[in-house]
Image (cartoon, helix red, strand yellow):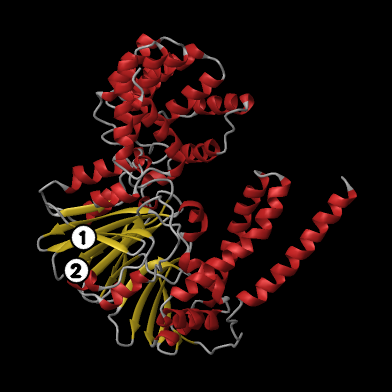
Amino acid sequence: MNKYRTYGILSSILIIGALLIFLFFSCSSFKPSGKEYAIEIRDGVKFFNQGYLEYREGIPFIYLKGDSYNIGLQYGVLLKEEMRSFYAQADSSMNVMMDRVYSESPWYMDIVIWAATPFVISSKLSSFKKRIPEDYLTQLKGMSEGSGIPLNDLLMATCADWLPCSSFIKNVNGSIIHGRNADHIEALDFTCKYPLIARYCKDGKYSYIDIGIIGTPFTVTGINEYGLTLSWSQATSKPFDGKGSMLMFNSILEECRNLKDVDKISKNVDRFVTMIGSLEDGTGAAYDIVDEKSVRTDSKNGYIYATNRCVSQSMRKEYNSIFDMDWFNSSRAYTYENILSNDGEFSVDDAINLLSNTDFYSYTGKIPPFKGGNINNNQTGSSVVLDPANCTVYFAYGTTYGSFYRWLKYNYKTEEVSIYKNEDDRLHDPDVIEYMKLEKRWNNIDWENKDELQQMVYEIEQLSVENFWTLHNSCWAWYNLGKYEKVKEIINRQIEKYPDFLSSYSNMGFFYMYQKNYEEAINYFKKSLDTWITNESKQMYCYEQLAAIYTEIGDVTKSKDCYSRVLDYYNRYWIPEQSREEVNRIEELLETKN
């Protein structure tokens, strides 16, 4: 390496190091005192100030009472060891993630990433801290003081966005049942191991219960003393400036007793759909909240649900792309609609069964399909059913398929806690265990590496499971390996097993298209458009391929007709920047005369 280049890199590292040291001291605007607080223990229960912590059926239940600072202090003192364990695990997971980033980028980008990350984090925290209401910032400072966890670490947990999910509200005999699954994404391996049921009784506010995670001081699923229920999920992929604060969810539970109250409260989060149920109103509503814009959609025909995109059609048009409605969301929507629209009785058991659903549309089986396609899935870390009429919360936490784990029943009026439902047998089924291990390996497959592909199809063939995605992956692995007869055989198996599914036919369309058998390709793409298990993004892809085929065979009229349909699909939604060039190309093509 050129010595001047070496000197330049070393100088840059020294400058960056100095800046990082400066950032460390400038960002640490509040440091915990390290003071030790006296805790009283009686019959296994920890008491401090007006709060106490006890473990029931292995789950920590914490009761907090007082002003904002003292509630935070009680939380930090009583959960000190648990919080330190959580944040140590979070740091470890972050290091693993950054190692993956570094391994996939060139060495010079590693330096840029390493240098830029503290600036990005510092800027985000500084901006976020200015937006947090003083009441909550005081509470966070109390948590930091009591636990010894730096305030900035708590702020990072508060402004994180890693819990997409699906949820529903069903009107039942003048009351409601509110269910929710939380998908913890990358953080799943450790977040679900830190469950917490927290009861907040803040001076001058409504008391509420948070069914959450240790060390994350915001509510994602909760219920207050008036039976107002809340859950949220990610609503859109459209990028934002990050002007919101998720602590708004806490304020809803602290200040609202019905939907009319919720309408009045300030909405200030970035991109979430918030499901609110009201015991007083006997119904529920979805609030699509995007960058301080809020649209309420009321329960219709006795139910409402959310599947990781805006519920309001107008908000979908403005903030969702067509690609937000892939198989997992469309299958979830189908399942919710199919079950919730039933006019018969609906109980807590029905709600738990719905959250535990792993069927792919109407296709049932012991093994859940790969890559979603269901409500309970391999990234579900916790599941909750809220029953305000009976003052009861039901919940389960697990490392995958959270609704399959043990369900506890908590009556917050009588303070009784009991096991409601034992673990699902599928968690211990050797086939399921084998299949889930293989799923993880599939995620890291290099499709350009022939040896890896060969090993993958070998493992799939040895697996005692066959579902759409085992067939789909082996099909295209064999295609990359040049085994075309094998590909055709597998796709025919897909069509036989999933005759109502668009991709069963579109895969064959792609196969014939690549073989330049355009007549058969057109035939199968048209068949795929006639199937009833479909979604708009997949339909659009089929029209794109048909347009390309018609262009190839010189049928300009049919090609333009298909491109016109593609453009229509795009224009029903927000168009992401990476799709804009393709949309412009299609618009220009349609404007030409020939």
Mark 2 lies on a secondary structure that is helix
Q: What is the C-alpha distance between the residues marked 2 and 1? A: 8 Å
Q: Residue 285 carries which label?
A: 1
Point out the tag, 2 or 1, that comes first from the N-terminus: 2
Q: Residue at x 59, y 58 (%)?
A: 94
Determine which of the numbered discs, if any, sits on residue 259 in the image: 2
Label 1's element?
strand
C-beta proximity under 8 Å, tags 2 and 1 = yes
Q: In this view, does 480 lie above or below 173?
A: above
Q: Is residue 374 left or right of residue 15?
A: left
Q: Where is residue 273 in the image (x, y as percent from the top left)?
A: 31, 58
Q: Which amino acid does label 2 sit on?
A: Leu
What's the amino acid at mark 1? Ala
Query: Does 430 sit above or below residue 154?
Result: above
Q: Residues within 10 Å of mark 1 (few under 14, many from 20)?
A: many
Q: Which mark is residue 451?
A: none
